[in-house]
Amino acid sequence: MPLNRRKFLKKSAVTGAGVALTGAVAAPSAQAATSAAAGSGKKPVKRHSLTVMGTTDLHGHVFNWDYFKDAEYKDAAGNAQGLARISTLVNEIRKEKGRCNTLLLDAGDTIQGTPLTYYYAKVDPITAKGGPVHPMAQAMNAIGYDAVALGNHEFNYGIETLRKFESQCRFPLLGANALDAKTLKPAFPPYFMKTFHVPGAPSVKVAVLGLTNPGIAIWDKAYVQGKLTFPGLEEQAAKWVPKLRSMGADVVVVSAHSGSSGTSSYGDQLPYVENSAALVAQQVPGIDAILVGHAHVEIPELKVTNTETGRTVVLSEPLAHAERLSVFDFELVLEKGKWQVESVKASVRNSNSVADDPKITRLLKDEHDLVVAYVNQVVGTATDTLTTVEARYKDAPIIDLITKVQEDVVKAALVGTEYASLPVIAQASPFSRTSEIPAGKVTIRDLSSLYVYDNTLVAKVLTGAQVRAYLEYSANYFVRTAAGAVIDTEKLTNANNRPDYNYDYVSGLRYDIDIAQAEGSRIKNLTYNGAALDDAQQFVFAVNNYRANGGGAFPHVASAKEVWSESTEIRTRIAEWVTAKGVLDPKEFASVDWKLTRDGTPVF
């Protein structure tokens, strides 16, 4: 989507001093608590309690609804999802603590992830003249969020969509390390400040610093290159936290769209750590608590010691999709006329313990019903049931459908170009373990469940040698398993915690993956057109934009020559392909390109 340059530069010119939002809050009914030892003669100590609530990685989940299954969301753990549940939890805590003593934050990844958010980005886009208000803006405004950090998926639909969403929110979108590429000034508000009035005592100032993920520069390169730059979280926190303290902040909370593991999925492509929340706590003095996002793991409470001050920083990450709400309880004490954080405790509350807030249900029922009708449109008929249940360890026809569509789109796009004569191969990953296209009528939701991400298609040129290295890297997904050992399919994959979306099929070739061998020596019998692969052979590689930009740190692909790309989602291309065919028959796309072996003997 084209960038509105005037609007962008106007936003980008905002400096730190101009983005502090100070909200006066109604005074609590009680005075600041006091305590003193009976008969000690000591002056009473004034204390005050504050509660900060936080969500993260909402990914468009407003209701406890699975649009791909057209049913209430259910999982084996009994979790529930959606902002309607979070709203109920928030209301309970505000009643318990006093709304004037609470703050509600989010750590990013808000406007992408469900057919609901896709619909209002692409089908009935919020950017259209007189367009709708984004459902996530409506819900979060109604719940009363105070501030939200930018996530990497905020950029998936381009800067114009993000800016429109921002304009519809009654809270700031924070990103201290999202900078204008030319001026290197913040392109979004770096922080938010809120003043809590305490009768009979000085007010408490709480500062919230928002940090986003440096990986945006890789994952959404097409949208942000030359426009935005994303330095490391530690660097920017070290710059901003002292400023916030000098501005009178008594409490500093960081909302960080960055996990706590200290790892990165993009190898050495960036000099910044992807999951650096714990490093920020460890290295940057002056932070009291960090709301963690991005990693989609549940961390009720993690205590990290700051190496400079020795003080404890408390971290918490609530489970994604509004399944949990993090709750930070702060105890403050007044010392020499200034509030000091005496203690911080964190915990999570489970959204499965409450019902939907009827206010949110009423607010967004029309939008929800519209999207349900959209995803249930029939686009074709399937001759066989296709499923991803075994797709992680067996070549599954349902994944071949993705690669076939990608091959066809790229071949058509390259007709008449100098690359038209090169063979086209394609990659695809088993994103879901439960996706199914049933025999009979095929709907948009069936196809959407197969390709759950809003990835787009890119064509790159790779040599045979580079493809071989790519496959070897992908094969590291499997746990090394000796010949003769019992096979447990639940323990066969995800070696070194590699997620399913970072394992790739590659179509158009034939190869074995020998899982009895060490990493780097697993690809056997690699052929093209029935002959051993020529390392010098050139291929056009049809690849999703996440992988093309370096996501997953696969070798060669990020630096390979790009010969074509588009902005239409692969999911849409699959729907178009099926609609045009009318009948989805595996005979038209299924092929056995690879198999698992051990010392040359097939595993299955």
Image: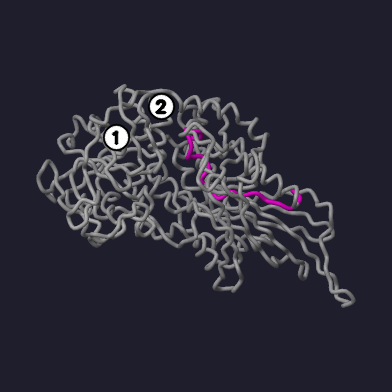
Residue 399 x, y percent position in the rendering: 31, 39
Pointer 1 local density, CA inside 10 Å: few below 14, some 14–19, many at least 20: many
Which residue shows up at 18% across the image and 53% down it?
601
Q: Is 112 inside the magenta-drawn segment?
A: yes
Left or right, 160 with reference to 390? right
Which residue shows up at 49% across the image and 33% down it?
67
- Circle on res. 211: none
Give the Cα distance between marks 2 and 1.
15 Å
Left or right, 245 with reference to 280? right
| Amino acid on which the number 2 mark rests in the picture | Thr
- Residue lying at the far left in this picture: please name it: 531
| Amino acid on which the number 1 mark rests in the picture | Leu
| Quadrant that contains the N terminus | top left
- Asked if labels 1 and 2 touch by Cβ distance under 8 angstroms, the answer is no
Label 2: state its secondary structure.
strand
First-in-chain label (2 vs 1)? 1
Q: Quadrant of residue 289?
A: bottom right
The front one of 53 and 590 is: 590
Q: Is residue 541 above or below residue 521?
A: above
Which residue shows up at 52% across the image and 31% down it?
126
Label 1: state its secondary structure.
helix
- Residue 385 visible at all: yes
Q: Which residue is mark 1?
A: 401
Residue 272 x, y percent position in the rendering: 42, 59
Q: Which residue is mark 2?
A: 443
* Region in magenta: 98-118
The front one of 469 and 268 is: 469
Left or right, 483 with reference to 36? left
Pointer 2 local density, CA inside 10 Å: few below 14, some 14–19, many at least 20: many
Q: Is 249 inside the magenta-drawn segment?
A: no
